[in-house]
Amino acid sequence: MTGTETLEKPAAGAGQTEHFDVLVVGAGVSGIGAAYHLQDQTPDRSYIVLETLESFGGTWLTHKYPGIRSDSDLYTFGYRFKPWVGAPIASAEEILKYMGEVIEENDIGRHIRYRHKINSASWSSEDNIWTIEGTRLDTNEPFRITANFLWMCQGYYKHDEGYTPDWPDMDKYKGQIVHPQTWPEDIELKGKKVIVIGSGATAATLVPAIAGDCEHVTLLQRSPTYFIPGRNENELADRLRELEVKEEWIHEITRREILHNQDEFTRRSFEEPEVVRKELLDAVRLFLPEETVQKHFTPRYRPWRQRIAFVPDGDIFQGIASGKANVVTDEIERFTEKGILTKSGEELEADIIISATGFHLSVLGDIDFAVDGKKVDYADTVTYRGMMFTGVPNLVWVFGYFRASWTLRVDLLGDFVCRLLNHMKEKGVSKVTVELRPEDKDMKLGPWIDPEDFNPGYLMRSMHLLPKCGDKPEWRHTQDYWKEKDELPLIDLESAEFVYAKAKTKEKAVA
């Protein structure tokens, strides 16, 4: 079984409605993790996973550009329950294989329905039920499903469209403009001059991956970013394998060491940023001369205000040192027929321009939500720990970590959601909403994530669409795994911010 088979009972026909205890939205790394935890911790619940794409994987399925790989180690990006046995930085193909094994080993495939796009989700307090309406993309037929609980695992950006700024005179350029998120299968790079616009993990992956095929590739960045170059191996894991330690133990021990080191690095980046800054730049100096490091790889901001990608074997720096690639740090004045004119007056010629300029943010899948007939605007809600929202019942959103692997939060929220579902069953209730307590009514509200703390462009462009945070621990989206791993398991589900209820009419099902 490959993980793409669907063995669940056939979908209801048009006009019919199916019901499940839990509906998981998305079959990426979050959705497959959610499905595992539901089966493991709440085996008495029925559930369904709906996925818009034709298979599982999310990011690792949609991104087809050369060299696509993780920028987090797989000992922590992998699930806690499934040992990782490969190199720490993995290709998309390796990650999909790993996820497929999780699906097959746990018989999750029969619960997944692919090519099912959700259009709307409407909550009724009369019977405490979500009604989900959507379209089957394979047949163009409508479908309707009801569920007691929604587990939003669809990620945080639009899969079908990347973000490309609207630069002046783009229409005058005679060459090809490509966004990595929608990489064309028929693109021909051999013998071509290529410009890659961007300075993040995608650009750092693309440049060395295509440098050998192109006549030349230029990395054009507005400003530098930090990278961590290093060997794509884990000495501790390799040594434990030599000692024939069980893979389950190797996974856990290695995972703990990496998380310990990441915690220390994150703490130091705040407490001694100049020291950490020097350490990061010294690593780049092992590959490139001082002049290049100062001009092109010395960011203006302190470490960890934006995500730091691991660069295996310093491949992007090796590509630059070899002369196959070069870096230009400048702003774009406008496009020309032959390429790009920078604000310093230099014209960069190219046959192909690749815009590795980020994402369009998607707030809970851009689904039309309504509660008791009233449209939900998530920007008007306050978040409970970055996962639940005031006034929106029976819903949790998995939004992972930026300074640690995304999947760490998938496992933590898996525990929380299952504990919450079991608690509701014990209480005999079918609705839970988080609400501000009396002492929170005058609480100062701020953005989803403090821009002084973390400020990548895709968040800054869409922060106004996201829920608000408060200034108390319960109402903050801290992005701090090392606190949450201790705090989330201890959440008192009878605290005043959790408001429970039974249905106003005879219940159709118990959550």
Image (cartoon, rainbow, N blue to C red):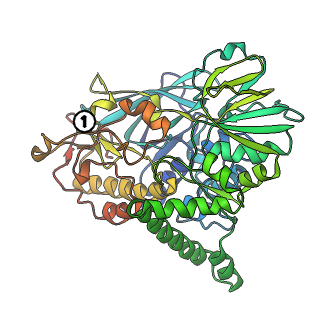
Relative to 14, residue 6 above or below: below
Relative to 471, residue 375 above or below: above
Q: Which image quadrant for residue 131?
A: top left
The residue identified by callout 1 is: 391
The residue that appears at 12% across and 40% down in the rendered structure is 442
The residue that appears at 33% across and 32% down in the rendered structure is 378
Q: Position of residue 52 (x, y in %)?
A: 58, 33
Task: Give the tally of numbered discs.
Answer: 1
Q: Using residue 71 as the reference point, say whether residue 272 is left or right of it.
A: left
Q: Position of residue 189 (x, y in %)?
A: 84, 34
Amino acid identity at mark 1? Gly
Q: Position of residue 53 (x, y in %)?
A: 62, 35
Q: Using residue 254 as the reference point, say whether residue 208 is left or right of it.
A: right
Q: Position of residue 115 (x, y in %)?
A: 61, 32
**Residue 99 visible from this viewpoint:** yes
Mark 1 surroundings within 10 Å by alpha-carbon count, few (fewer than 14), some (14 through 19), many (20 or more)? some
View extreme (bottom): residue: 243
As helix, strand or loop, the secondary structure at mark 1 comes to: loop
Q: Using residue 389 as the reference point, say whether residue 43 is left or right of it.
A: right
**Residue 6 visible from this viewpoint:** no
View extreme (left): residue: 438
View extreme (right): residue: 191
